[in-house]
């Protein structure tokens, strides 16, 4: 008797709330469809995903993060922490069209008190 109608490669389990778990052994594909309002919890000491991971929707991460490899960001990066409590360390160059510290633009700012010789310039001006 075929596991899923006429397809002997698919094994499907449908639950009374409408949740469906299906495994296609020919395609090596596992699919879980849960009804609206459902949640999923996976608890383990370690979880390893191999291959492309796509998340559609918002994502909340609690805890530290280590990334190996390059990161591509489209969109803004925003910190909700107070500026004084956020730090960033880079072991390579940070490049951009505009880099600012407060209201002082790194590429376009001027200094007062400039004089030739061994003296130092005055503070940067916005």
Image: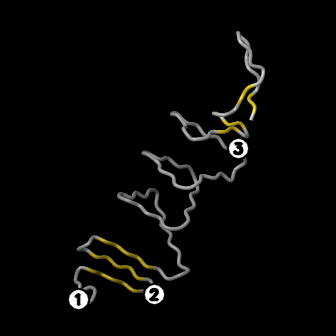
| Badge number at residue 18 | 2
How many circles with numbers are drawn on the protein?
Answer: 3
How far apart marks 1 and 2 lie (CA) works out to 21 Å
| Badge number at residue 6 | 1
| Left or right of 1 on screen, residue 38 | right
Q: Secondary structure at mark 1?
A: loop
**Residue 27: quarter of image:** bottom left
The residue at the far top in this view is 117
Q: Label 2 near label 1: C-beta < 8 Å?
A: no
Rendering coords of residue 33 (x, y %): 43, 79
- Please tell me which of labels 1 and 2 falls first in the chain: 1
**Residue 32: quarter of image:** bottom left
How far apart marks 1 and 3 lie (CA) works out to 61 Å
How far apart marks 2 and 3 lie (CA) works out to 47 Å
- Please tell me which of labels 1 and 3 falls first in the chain: 1
Rendering coords of residue 69 (x, y %): 42, 45
Frontmost residue, 49 versus 83: 83
Colour scheme shown: secondary structure
Q: Secondary structure at mark 3?
A: helix
Q: Secondary structure at mark 2?
A: loop
Frontmost residue, 101 versus 70: 101
Give the residue drawn at x 44%, y 83%: 19
**Dot 3 alpha-carbon crowd within 10 angstroms: few under 14, some 14 to 19, many 20 or more:** few
| Left or right of 82 on screen, residue 25 | left
Residue placed under numbered mark 3 in the picture: 85
């Amino acid at each position: 008797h075929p596991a899923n109608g006429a397809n002997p490669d698919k094994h499907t389990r449908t639950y009374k709330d409408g949740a469906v778990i299906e495994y296609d052994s020919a395609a090596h594909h596992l699919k879980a469809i849960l009804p609206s309002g459902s949640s999923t919890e996976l608890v383990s000491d370690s979880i390893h995903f191999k291959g492309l991971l796509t998340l559609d929707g918002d994502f909340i991460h609690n805890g530290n993060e280590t990334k190996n490899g390059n990161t591509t960001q489209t969109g803004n990066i925003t910190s909700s922490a107070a500026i004084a409590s956020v730090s960033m360390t880079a072991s390579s160059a940070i490049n951009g069209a505009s880099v600012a510290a407060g209201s002082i633009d790194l590429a376009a700012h001027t200094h007062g008190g400039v004089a030739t010789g061994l003296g130092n310039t005055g503070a940067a001006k916005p």
